[in-house]
Image: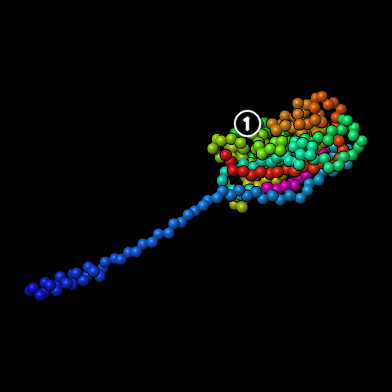
Amino acid sequence: MKKLSYLCGALLMFGATANAQLIDEKDVTVTMDLQPVLQLDMSTPDQIEFVFDEINEYYAGITKYGATQLRVSSTVSWDLYAVGRSTGTNGPEYWDQQLEYGNNNPNAIPNLPLSLLELRQAQANNGAAAAGGTYPDYSAAFSPSNTPSGQNSLYVNGGTSTPPSTNDKYIGGHAGTSGIPGDDFLPGGSYLTQTGITSNYFYVIDYRILPGLPAIFPMAAQADGTIAAANPLNDIESANAVGNYAEPGVYTMYVQYILLEDQ
């Protein structure tokens, strides 16, 4: 009887040893770095030319339809705006004069405001619900030649890095800190997945220049859209310069499109 009890105990001890689990653990640390990505793709001619050599072109202006296409991809909330730039040979607010025609008539003004260039975006800005200005974007149709308006005039910041304010125009998104999508920013996304002609990530831009008769560029406006005699940037039609006109010649400037993370 004692031998049988000893044997059973030995078998139980062996069984417990056979079922014991051995564990060896090692850890590896995984780091994820989420860098914000803002990508703006642009399709446009290298140079867009406006040649005014007919009287009707001065009166009605010249429009370049669909000259620029903008495609946005972003992992963060974003804003998109356009700003007029030049090298500043005539001042940061003015076109660069490359060539002049004529005999230096004192009424012929070479300082042409960058804001005389008008933009029109085919898709309205759906991120500017809280904008405070009269014109939150460039989606309005170009005004008739006999109805001066600053609704499409290009934003100008005098060569600084200052973005448009709540009263100025944005293409997508806007200035502000409401934190509500559509009020002052557009959420992350891409034209690759948000397709269609009403996509918030795809914009087609038209350009127009209207010199007028005489050539005073009546659509040139300040950043807030106000125009005409009170405009300090438009020397051509300033109140104390009656009889002035744009000096004939060749002028250049460029439009800079800026995509930035909403703040």
Foreground residue among 211 and 199: 211
Q: Which residue is at 8% across, 73% downward?
A: 2
Q: Which residue is at the far left? A: 1
Residue 175 shown in magenta: no
- Does the image show residue 69? yes
Position of residue 251 in the picture relative to residue 154 (left or right): right
Tag count in the figure?
A: 1
Q: Position of residue 228 (x, y in %)?
A: 77, 28
Residue 67 shown in magenta: yes
Q: Position of residue 39 (x, y in %)?
A: 63, 49
Q: Position of residue 60 (x, y in %)?
A: 83, 37
Q: Which residue is at the far right? A: 103
Q: Which residue is at 67% across, 31% downward?
A: 134
119 above or below 243? below
SS class, disc 1? loop
Please identify the quarter of the rendering in which residue 259 is found. top right
Q: Which residue is at 85% across, 32% downward?
A: 245
Foreground residue among 242 and 55: 242
Q: Which residues are magenta?
A: 61-70
Name the dominant secondary structure of the magenta segment: strand
Q: Which residue is at 18% across, 69% downward?
A: 12
Dot 1 crowding, Cα within 10 Å, few <14, some 14–19, many 20+: some
Give the image's coloring scheme.
rainbow
Q: Amino acid at mark 1?
A: Gly
Position of residue 101 in the picture relative to residue 38 (left or right): right
Q: Which residue is at the far top? A: 240
Residue receiving disc 1: 132
